[in-house]
Image (tube, helix red, strand yellow):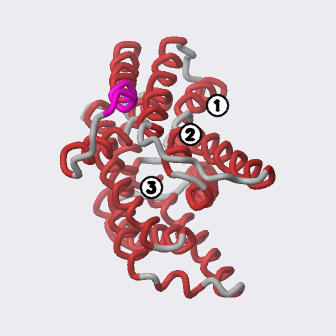
Amino acid sequence: MSSFFWTGLTLLTWGVAGIFDKKAVESADPKAVFVTFHLFLAVVTLVLWIALPWIYADWHITPGVLLWEGLNAVAAMVAFLLYYYAMSKTQASWVLGITAGYPIIGQLLSTPLTGEPFKFSSLTAAALVSVGVALVGWSGGEEQKKLDHRDKVVLISCVAGSTVLWGLLGIFEKLALNYGRPFETYFAQATWKTILVVLVVVLCKKYGYVTAFRTPGAWKFSWLSAAGVTAGNIAYILALTTSTAGYVITMTAGYPLVMYVFALAFLKEKLNVIRAAGIALIVAGAVAMQLSS
């Protein structure tokens, strides 16, 4: 199928997952959300291990896949930790608005790291999407919490770190696909993340944080979010097999739009001017990227 189909499916599933993710953060400690979210991948790993012989009769995991998916897993989990910490310290809309810049990072780094040709039009499209998502994120008009200088420095560092790491994820995935097929690479990614989250649980238990993971809300909403993210990640990988990393990173970055369309349609939120402008920019950026590809 075309990259347009797979990117569209990624947008839909990630957008729905974001709704559950928000509910999870509201109902449980961020540490609990992080751990329970990633424990879902243990189930995914087991299912893929059973299914892979039917998907690829000659399936195998090469060193190249292990290397790039290992970097992918570490980058993703560190990015999520930084993101959840930032979410616990300030308004979600502010964090979402800043981290929306990751498609620009992906576009700038895709050329030197993957050898994809640089296109100014693609960078412009990525910028339009990023600004659009930022405007949608800030459109709620939340009053920002007052933080001292140290907290501000830590918060900005966390947000900047997660933005850069998210920009790298699609590039690591694209490089992994040079050494393996889609479900092989995702199996390696899920395995790495399962190993890493088990280490996190062991460390948390050692330092007395284990009780936070017994929060019912963390399991209910985190696993619903994780199911959506897993479906989106698989669609994302399949999109990368049919197009460039820069294209896929930018096109899928508009997934918050799905969340806000849902909020407008079912939660009866109002469409203010800032939010409307943000939606228009996301759509314009997606159209520009499609035309430049």
Residue at horizontal 67%, vertical 42%? 160
Residue behind mark 3? 186
Callout count: 3
Q: Which mark is residue 175?
A: 2
- SS at mark 3 in the image: helix
Earlier-in-chain disc, 3 versus 2: 2
Q: Does the magenta stretch include residue 275?
A: yes
Query: Quick check: 122 above or below 175?
Result: above
Residue at horizontal 42%, vertical 37%? 139
Q: Position of residue 195 (x, y in %)?
A: 58, 71
> Is residue 291 rendered to the left or right of residue 70?
left
Earlier-in-chain disc, 1 versus 3: 1
Query: Quick check: 27 above or below 75?
Result: below
Q: Position of residue 146 (x, y in %)?
A: 66, 52
Callouts 1 and 2 close, C-beta under 8 Å = yes
Identify which amino acid the numbered label 2 is placed on: Leu
- SS at mark 2 in the image: helix
Mark-to-mark CA distance, 1 and 3: 20 Å
Residue at horizontal 38%, vertical 42%? 256
Q: Where is residue 202 in the image (x, y as percent from the top left)?
A: 64, 83
Residue 283 occupies quadrant:
top left
| Residue nearest the viewer, comparing 36 with 27 | 27
Can I make out residue 240 in this image?
A: no
Earlier-in-chain disc, 1 versus 2: 1
Residue behind mark 1? 113
| Residue nearest the viewer, comparing 29 with 111 | 29
Mark-to-mark CA distance, 1 and 2: 9 Å
Q: Position of residue 96 (x, y in %)?
A: 51, 44
Q: Does the magenta stretch include residue 265?
A: no
Image quadrant holding the C terminus, namely top left
Magenta region: which residues?
272-278
